Amino acid sequence: MIDPAITFPSQVSLPSLIHSLIYILGAAGMIFLLFGLLLIDAGTVKKQNAFTSGIEKLVGFFIGFGSYLLFGFGLWLAQYYLMRGNSLTDSISDWWLGGTMTNSLAQAVDPARFSHVNEYQIFLFFLACTAGIINVLFHFAVSERIKASAYYLTCVVAALGSSLLSWWTWGSVGPLTNAGYHDFFGVGFVYLFPAGMAIVLVSRLGPRPGIFSEGKSSHLSHYSNPVFATIGTVMIFAALPMVIISCLFFFEKTGFAVSVTMADTSIGLVLNNYGAAWLGGMLSGALIAYLKRNYNYLLLGPFAGYVSGAAGFDVYLPWQMLLVAMVAPVVAALVDSALRHFRIDETKLIPLFAGAGSYGLIMVGILHSGTPRGGYFGLSEGDFAFQHDVIGLPMQAAGIVLCLGGGILVASLLCVILKRTTGLRISDNAGHQGLDHYYWEIEYSEER
């Protein structure tokens, strides 16, 4: 017997609960992902800066989370509101922090007004975590040299900027995605956007103190504990499958899934492609590391393979994914070498995201050109008909330009504002003393 207090039981049905649990799993994966990134940070900064760098990332995560919770979800969800003839204002009004849908019990909402409220409320949390992770990733490019105040202001702007890009480039009926741009995991707004910001801010900030000292490797001289970085890498490998599964949409009352872009796929295929991406990246990365005698590539390799495949986990065949991923560390290494040649102190975001990420988006457009996707299930005609469009190289290139260019534009404007307000770079005194001592009076023994 159905409880009479449950006005609309279809909103809280058993299939709804199962789908909700999948997105809860994705949200949990995001928290483990944050843990892994903080471990990598602890292993790849100066010992004297480790606490400051880690805590800035954690604060930046919650600034992004809160900014997204305030307005971001309404921006992303606008694509589906506009599809139904509603407005951007309607979407934000329903889904901002004080919005109707954000603050309603699922069972009290008429499905004719909005269906699957439970799932979307959980997805709000999931994407708010994503906004926080974007800020953490960006900090990897500028840590140990950017002022905390400048970074925190950047976090607010980055959260809103990535939210706008997610509306355009991640989903199935956004302006770019409905026109043929294909990005399963959100490589454009999650990885390319902060990489574009890094391109500008790293050049303005300059290198960390002593990073290019004569006789030292620019990659290894500042690593405090590579073991932490290795453990963090394994943690991320374990966390990402939970996140990846949350990038699927499921048909009513079945386990049949399509990707967020509405391309035909299956959970098993997606996970095997993920594994093949890490495998290919690790094999090539290890080869480069041993040839160069530089263990940095043992960590860069698997991440490069993963990033190169993330846009197409839903459409690749595992053997294709393996081959694409094996090339990705070479692309990242070439970009990395060019940066070091010009004495640009950035070995993470630009090689991995701008390099391997752009390469991966292009390969999807080449290898799977013509694959049906886009639109929305249940619609058989019109501009938003299910799978009405196909993957194509020109739209993949357009997505790269938009996301990288968006990051470059946002960071360029921010630099003008920050230079006239808080300033950008930490003082030379703070850099040489160590940020933990300078800001928090934390002392470390000389022994390691």
Image (tube, rainbow, N blue to C red):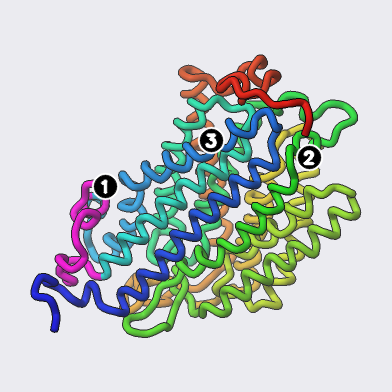
Tag 3 secondary structure:
helix
The residues colored magenta run: 93-115
| Of the two numbered discs 3 and 2 in the rendering, the one whose residue sits closer to the viewer | 3
- Contact (Cβ within 8 Å) of mark 3 with mark 2: no
Which residue does the numbered mark 1 point to in the structure image? 97
Picture quarter with the N terminus: bottom left
Badge 1 local density, few (<14 within 10 Å), some, or many (20+)? many
Which residue does the numbered mark 3 point to in the structure image? 55
Query: Which amino acid does the dot numbered 1 rest on?
Result: Leu
Residue 15 at x, y percent in the picture? 32, 79
Residue 103 in the figure: left or right of residue 286: left
Which residue does the numbered mark 2 point to in the structure image? 219
In the displayed structure, 39 sits above or below 252; it is above
Q: Earlier in the sequence, mark 3 or mark 2?
A: 3
Quadrant housing residue 238: bottom right
Q: Who is closer to the viewer here, 405 or 378?
A: 378
- Contact (Cβ within 8 Å) of mark 2 with mark 1: no
Badge 3 local density, few (<14 within 10 Å), some, or many (20+)? few
Tag 2 secondary structure:
loop
- The span from disc 1 to disc 3 (Cα, nearest Å) is 25 Å
Q: Earlier in the sequence, mark 2 or mark 1?
A: 1
Q: Principal SS element in the magenta part?
A: loop
Q: How many marks?
A: 3
Query: Which amino acid does the dot numbered 2 rest on?
Result: His
Residue 314 at x, y percent in the picture? 55, 73
Badge 2 local density, few (<14 within 10 Å), some, or many (20+)? some
- The span from disc 2 to disc 1 (Cα, nearest Å) is 42 Å
